[in-house]
Image (tube, helix red, strand yellow):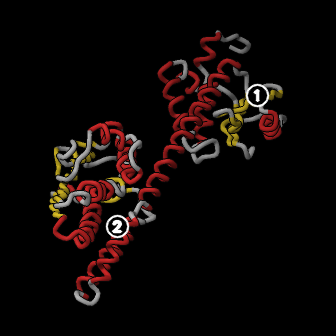
Amino acid sequence: MPGMSVPAEEGQARGPLWSRRLRDPAAVLETARHVAEDLADGLAGPRARAAARGIRRLLAADGVGLADLSGALVTAGTLPRDVDAAAMVEEVLHTESRCRRAEVVAVPLVVHDELAGALVVAGSTRMTALHEVAALLVEALERSRLEESAEQAAEAELRALRAEISPHFVYNALTVIASLVRSEPDRSRELMLDFADYIRYSLASHGEYTTVADEFHAIETYLALQRAVLGDRLRVQIRVAPEVLAVAIPFLVLQPIVENAVRHGIESQAGGGTVQVLGEAEGADCVLSVEDDGAGMAPEKAAALLAGDGASTSMGLANVDRRLRNVYGPWFGLVVETAEGEGTRVIVRVPRFQPGVVP
């Protein structure tokens, strides 16, 4: 009836669907999770507008705006025309303090003690709820920065690993190739092509992932060069099951392990030794192993190498171990079986199929 008052509960029931849904704690948590995911690329990322819509639902606000340090606003809903929201954002970015104009509030978003942007909210919103949502945004931005830093660190480690080519190996390989130029020109040419192939693969600047087939090809090339250098002192056995050849793995996972087996396991032995490289399927996993019958080491030293505390000549093992754990989780690092005088076996176990791991 005209002029009839409506009870508060009934008025709320006639409100927008999202305001009714968010009275359910599960819906609130779901929306908050989506907001955090939408901010994975920052306040100016491609999903910032979706994040603004989620924040508006959380606060039941008339309008919401998000701004990074550039001051550019990404909005959802309606901000009053008689209030200059852009000027409010500029004031917040300049003073790093809250700004209010009528029913519009702008608050700073500070991540790791550094101003990251501002949140603008229009409508009668409780300040307690506003501060809780702002804290949610700060936490999401902090997580995004940490993930970005982890990715940058992993990329830096991979670049370092790609550049870690032993000058001693390069010198010996080129010396052997040069010595064969006149006596065995065909053999010299073959080894030179192997050397170029090895360098090209090790320093490849594209791709974070490769296949087991490509990694085994690089290993065969490296071992062919080392056999030319070490002669009969180095014996090689390589076996890989066809069903794992197409498995995608992080770039340069096996090659550093094989290089360590030759350099630290075999070269130091007067009589040389054998390096075995195996690849096989075990259920849903791909298991790769590199084993030598060389000098071996104390288990404590192996643990130190994996922790990055060992000699710089073996830093590749710690690098590979960290990258495996970053990609697959803490259960998929390297396993090293060794003892002094008993040789060394390094095992890599990875899922045969992993979302996001594509060569």
Q: Position of residue 342 (x, y in %)?
A: 17, 46
Along the viewing direction, whichever of 65 and 166 lies nearer the viewer: 166
Along the viewing direction, whichever of 134 and 53 lies nearer the viewer: 134
Image quarter (top left, top right, bottom left or bottom right) of the N terminus:
top right
Residue to which mark 1 is pinned: 105
CA neighbours of label 1 inside 10 A, class few (<14), some (14 to 19), many (20+):
many
Element class at badge 2: helix
Q: Position of residue 246 (x, y in %)?
A: 25, 59
Residue 80, picture quadrant: top right
Q: Is 266 placed left or right of 161 in the picture?
A: left
Residue to which mark 2 is pinned: 169
Give me the residue at 24% from left, 66% from top.
223
Give me the residue at 42% from left, 56% from top.
161
Along the viewing direction, whichever of 159 and 12 lies nearer the viewer: 159
- Indicate whether 39 appears above or below 352: above
Q: Which mark is residue 274?
A: none
Residue 236 in sight here: yes
Work out whether mark 1 precedes mark 2 in sequence or the reverse, and give the earlier one. Answer: 1
Give me the residue at 60% from left, 11% from top.
9
- Indicate whether 279 appears above or below 336: below
